[in-house]
Image (spheres, rainbow, N blue to C red):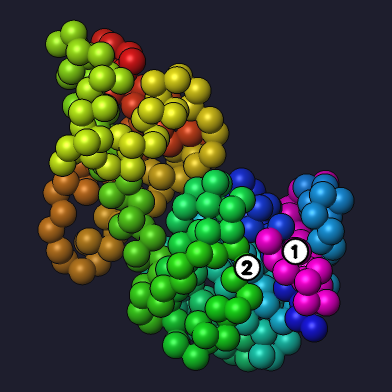
């Protein structure tokens, strides 16, 4: 019998924890959940059969999963739990964290006999609900293999390197998301100003070499419809693009396009609002061009 604890029941964490609860029902294990707002954990327990737990109880789990906004919140939980953690516990951090934080967190937990993997996810709330998230994992191979059978919310699980590599890949992935979204928005705004219907333009682009997930899915479903459903916050996308830029600078590399996109995404978060869906960044592109993408 395995006891898991999932800490952080946001838009991604709640459905991910639901898959762990279903797996626990099948295997006779236990699935604990915790959220800084206790009512959310209690609602999850009612809906999915998990167990709303205090942090003290969660500290005794065999596997601890975290899915929080930043590495700073994870540091806070480590501080709150480390005196109660059991040697042999495996801590899997699904936060879109900072690569520089991972070795420090791993070292701090290792002093308590606890293993640590940075394992951010990609696939959005739809992937979390379907249990098909891509998990990019940084850490020793044997620890990745120990975690793999318990990743009930996952589709592909890829070890991308040593500690911190998972966070690095996630940051660059999301910087590319921002770049694709922004470039597509500029292109479509230009076409709309020229009198072209955005939907017709997308039909051509998506059958041609300019297509991306932004043009195939995000813009048709969220921008053209003017729905902008709040799934992945624009402020978090700006944070991840900034982490990617930190990675460039730490490696003394050159990425002028990513740097420009990081700045534009940060500006969009400030103007449009950090809690808005990330696709709402295109509202700033629209304002620049005096058109709506439609």
- Based on the picture, tell me whether residue 25 belongs to the magenta stretch: yes
Q: Nearer the viewer, residue 239 or 16?
A: 16
Quick check: marks 1 and 2 in contact, CB under 8 Å?
yes
The answer to which image quadrant residue 271 occupies is top left
Q: Is residue 26 left or right of residue 229?
A: right
Quadrant in which the N terminus is drawn: bottom right
Residue 17's spot in the image, x, y percent? 69, 60
Determine which of the numbered discs, if any, sits on residue 152 in the image.
Answer: 2
- Which structural element holds mark 2? loop
- Based on the picture, tell me whether residue 284 belongs to the magenta stretch: no
Going 59% across and 71% down the picture, which residue do you hit?
151
Asked whether the viewer can see residue 265, the reply is: no
Quadrant in which the C terminus is drawn: top left
Going 38% across and 60% down the picture, which residue do you hit?
170
Q: CA distance from mark 1 to mark 2?
A: 9 Å
Determine which of the numbered discs, if any, sits on residue 276 in the image.
Answer: none
- Which structural element holds mark 1? helix
**Residue at the disc numbered 1:** 22
Q: Is residue 89 left or right of residue 180?
A: right
Classed neighbour count for the residue bearing mark 2: other residues with Cα under 10 Å, few (<14), some (14–19), many (≥20): some
Q: Is residue 159 above or below residue 142?
A: above
Q: Nearer the viewer, residue 108 or 32?
A: 32
Q: Is residue 227 above or below residue 240?
A: above
- Magenta part of the chain: 19-39
Residue 139's spot in the image, x, y percent? 44, 82
Residue 44's spot in the image, x, y percent? 79, 51
């Amino acid at each position: 019998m395995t006891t898991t604890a999932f800490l952080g029941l946001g838009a991604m964490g709640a459905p991910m924890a639901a898959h762990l609860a279903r797996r626990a029902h099948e295997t006779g294990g236990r699935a604990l959940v915790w959220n800084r707002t206790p009512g959310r954990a209690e609602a999850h327990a009612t809906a999915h059969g998990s167990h709303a737990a205090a942090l003290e109880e969660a500290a005794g789990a065999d596997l601890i999963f975290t899915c929080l906004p930043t590495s700073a919140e994870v540091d806070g939980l480590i501080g709150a739990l480390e005196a109660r953690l059991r040697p042999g516990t495996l801590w899997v951090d699904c936060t879109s964290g900072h690569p520089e934080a991972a070795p420090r967190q791993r070292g701090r937990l290792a002093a308590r006999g606890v293993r640590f993997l940075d394992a951010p996810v990609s696939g959005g709330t739809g992937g979390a609900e379907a249990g098909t998230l891509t998990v990019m994992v940084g850490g020793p191979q044997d620890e990745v293999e120990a975690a793999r059978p318990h990743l009930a919310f996952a589709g592909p699980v890829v070890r991308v390197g040593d500690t911190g590599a998972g966070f690095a890949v996630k940051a660059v992935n999301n910087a590319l998301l921002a770049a694709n979204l922004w470039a597509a928005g500029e292109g479509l705004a230009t076409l709309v100003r020229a009198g072209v219907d955005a939907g017709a333009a997308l039909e051509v682009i998506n059958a041609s070499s300019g297509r991306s997930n932004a043009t195939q899915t995000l813009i048709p479903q969220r921008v053209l419809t003017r729905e902008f459903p709040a799934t992945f916050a624009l402020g978090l996308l700006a944070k991840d693009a900034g982490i990617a830029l930190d990675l460039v600078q730490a490696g003394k590399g050159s990425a002028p396009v990513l740097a420009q996109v990081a700045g534009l995404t940060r500006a969009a978060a400030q103007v449009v609002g950090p809690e808005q869906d990330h696709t709402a960044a295109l509202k700033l592109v629209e304002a620049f061009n005096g058109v709506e993408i439609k």
